[in-house]
Amino acid sequence: MKAIQKEAARQVCFSKRRAGVFKKASELFVLCGAEIAVLAFSPSGKPFSYGHPSVESILERFFGGSADAAPATPPRHPLSAVLVQALGRQEKELRERLEAGKRRKAALEEALRGPQWGPVGGADVEELGLPELDLLQP
Amino acid sequence: MKAIQKEAARQVCFSKRRAGVFKKASELFVLCGAEIAVLAFSPSGKPFSYGHPSVESILERFFGGSADAAPATPPRHPLSAVLVQALGRQEKELRERLEAGKRRKAALEEALRGPQWGPVGGADVEELGLPELDLLQP
DNA sequence: AGCACTATACTTAGCTC
DNA sequence: TGAGCTAAGTATAGTGC
């Protein structure tokens, strides 16, 4: 399996397979009762999402962390060697991520104070919304 | 298609289909170059995720804009509020890991001054990895 | 862009070990 | 648990509209 070169064919393939993935996700819910969210960007950069019961609720459960569940942000990648050097780098990276996160949080909070609350540019509502939820039910 | 009643069969089905969905997601990336993230909770409540290039990068692109520059188009999507909340939690977690990492580094440096140098018991070492999560296995 | 068709390949429920 | 098997059901690349 390899990357599709032809721009048009790639876009078509994305549309078809995106529907496929969303359908698989909805089946996973119907069959197993599993909560699931899928977020994707098309090759042309447009956002699409699917979520059951909703993308929001999944993210809250994942990142908000419930009272009893351990935090679901599971960022651990096994290293097999002991590297003090790596710890130094990790410390630096963590610092950077911490700072970046704080900046983004501040920016988001600022933006949320703005007067309007709705779709930004044309693409958002149609594609961020969850219309497929019903359509895709088998 | 309807819900599987038998608890055990439902769990098995979830495992198989979760792998299927993740595979579809990765194929979507390979074929089309689409960035995609999948978050799911098993029927028993365990979190799983798949993301390319990473779950976090997808979420940022979806809801936040870049980490450094304040987004030119302010994020007005309802989920931004969730993200703010998540970033608050993440900040706390990153701080904790930063401190833990520094303690480990100090401990390791101390240990390296000691007499022996050989295979070290695994548990601590496994946790030292960098954070980019891809596949969360239980 | 989207819809319909089809041959081929893929996925998977149920089962065994 | 997990892995392997198989029949039956699905997905989809390619094609023409």
Image (spheres, coloured by chain):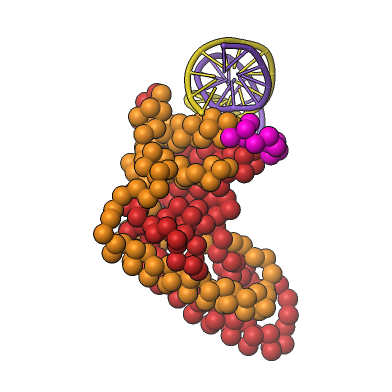
Chain colours: A orange, B red, C yellow, D purple
Magenta residue span: A1-11
Determine which quarter of the picture holds residue B102: bottom right
Q: Is residue A120 left or right of residue A78?
A: left
User: Compared with residue B41, is residue B63 higher up or lower down, i.e. above or below?
Assistant: below
Camera-side residue of A15 and B137: A15
Q: What is the quadrant of the C terminus of chain A in the image?
A: top left
Q: Nearer the viewer, residue B59 or A91?
A: B59
Q: Is residue A46 above or below residue A73?
A: above
Picture residue at 58% right of the left edge, 53% below the top = B53
Horizontal side of A32 relative to B117 (left or right) equals: left
Q: Single out the residue that lies furthest toward the left.
A: A115
Q: Which residue is more in the foreground, B5 or B67? A: B67
Q: Is residue A60 visible?
A: no
Q: Is residue B68 inside the magenta stretch?
A: no
Please report the residue visible at 37 percent of the width from the left and 46 percent of the height from the top: A55
x, y percentage for residue B120? Answer: 66, 73
> Is residue A132 among the parts visible in the rendering?
yes
Residue A81 % position (x, y):
69, 69
Image quarter of the N terminus of chain A = top right
Residue A88 percent coordinates (x, y):
62, 79
Number of dots carrying numbers = 0
At horizontal 40% and vertical 48% (from top left) the residue drawn is A121
At x 67%, y 66%, the residue is A80
Q: Position of residue A98 (x, y in %)?
A: 47, 73
Whether residue A4 appears in magenta in the rendering, the answer is yes
